[in-house]
Image (tube, helix red, strand yellow):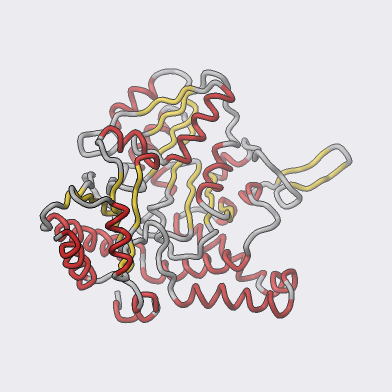
Amino acid sequence: MNLYKLRADTPGTKNVIHFNNAGASLMPAPVYKAVTDYLYDEYMFGGYETADKYKKVLNEFYSNAAMLIHAKSDEIAFMENATSAWDMAFYSIPFRKGDRILTSKVEYASNFIAFLQMQKRAGVVVDIIESLPSGEIDSDALETELKKRNVKLVSITHMPTNGGVVNPVEEVGKLAEKYNALYLLDACQSAGQYPLDVNKIRCHFLSATGRKYLRGPRGTGFLYVNRQQLKTLEPVTLDLHSAEWKHKESYEIRNDAKRFEKWEAGLAGKYGLSVAIQYLLGLGIESVWDRVQYLAELMRNALQAIPGIEVLDQGKIKSGIVTFRSGSISAEEIKKRLREKAMNTSVAVRSHTLIDMEERKIDTAVRASVHYYNTEEEIETFSETLMSLLK
């Protein structure tokens, strides 16, 4: 990687030390240009007319997203965020009373709330799979539950919003396939930092966001739906884009993943996300993952050397999400003081991963998430500043 060029492409690095990439990364210049160029044309010439002008490059979004995760372009739907993508997949599944959903202890709040709603609405059973001491889902425990009856869905988060864990998604996929269960993967934090291959993962659905490690604009994301599964699912809502009104009393749903889209969308953001994915593909996702792991380990080592700081991360393999807490200053106060020094972090709260954080007796934690454009010098400055704040 040419770090000089990467940082030249990221003017925000001149203003802040940005360790909030698991929240929203700094966009590279080509993404900013794509979005602003599109909006300028809408401003000057009209929304419908601009959509016609950019039709070809907007359609390239599907092939770019497919290339990122080794899918086919007709298996990709553009979404306004990862939660919408996940919801469109989840609520299209025809659950019945007694169906079981298997999930992990690090599942994200929005997903678990949907499980509980479906439990109330349809009478499904939600079972939580035990974790290994290192934090990942226990594959043996998962198989034990899969051997039992009525497992409709295995739904896990690849990388939780805090804690560093990388779940063994390929092992999970093999087991879900072996026992004929649907498999929904939340790749919100992993898309853009980790190599994803849906053929190896064997998932039926994958949801992702644009604003995090993909470095796209906010208000963007995508959903992958396996081509074989598409024909068996009807989205919970339809419109004239996802279906065609054929006769007075009948309609026909699209035969591709666009059946999960709506006609109206933020097209400037869609173009920006497409360019962001192209930018990432040009760098090579394996190189990105190697650098993210390297920087995250530097960050953890630097934090562990600070008296009064406890690094909270688990995992045999750890992500670029680094979480820690202080015994003397609250996470919110640390974030506030660091921001005053032009250093961006975020705070992980108990309710976002309730089961995991309750079990580990963590109320809040500071989340410092690295990306490939961060530097060793930024980590050193960050740790020195944090140390001075704690004195």
What is the x, y in percent for residue 52?
A: 72, 71
The residue shown at (10%, 57%) is 305
Vertical arrangement, residue 31 with respect to residue 8, above or below: above
Quick one: which residue is furthest to the right in this view? 248
* Left or right relative to 42: residue 30: left
* Left or right relative to 183: residue 337: left
What is the x, y in percent for residue 315?
A: 23, 44
Image quarter hosting the C terminus? bottom left
The residue shown at (20%, 67%) is 385
Image quarter hosting the N terminus? bottom left
Where is residue 122, by image quadrant? Answer: top right
> Could you say which is closer to the camera, residue 108 or residue 385?
385
The residue shown at (23%, 49%) is 325
What is the x, y in percent for residue 71?
A: 49, 53
Vertical arrangement, residue 366 with respect to residue 351, above or below: below
Where is residue 340, by image quadrant? Answer: bottom left
Vertical arrangement, residue 220 with respect to residue 127, above or below: below
Where is residue 247, by image quadrant? Answer: top right
Question: Does residue 339 show up?
Answer: yes
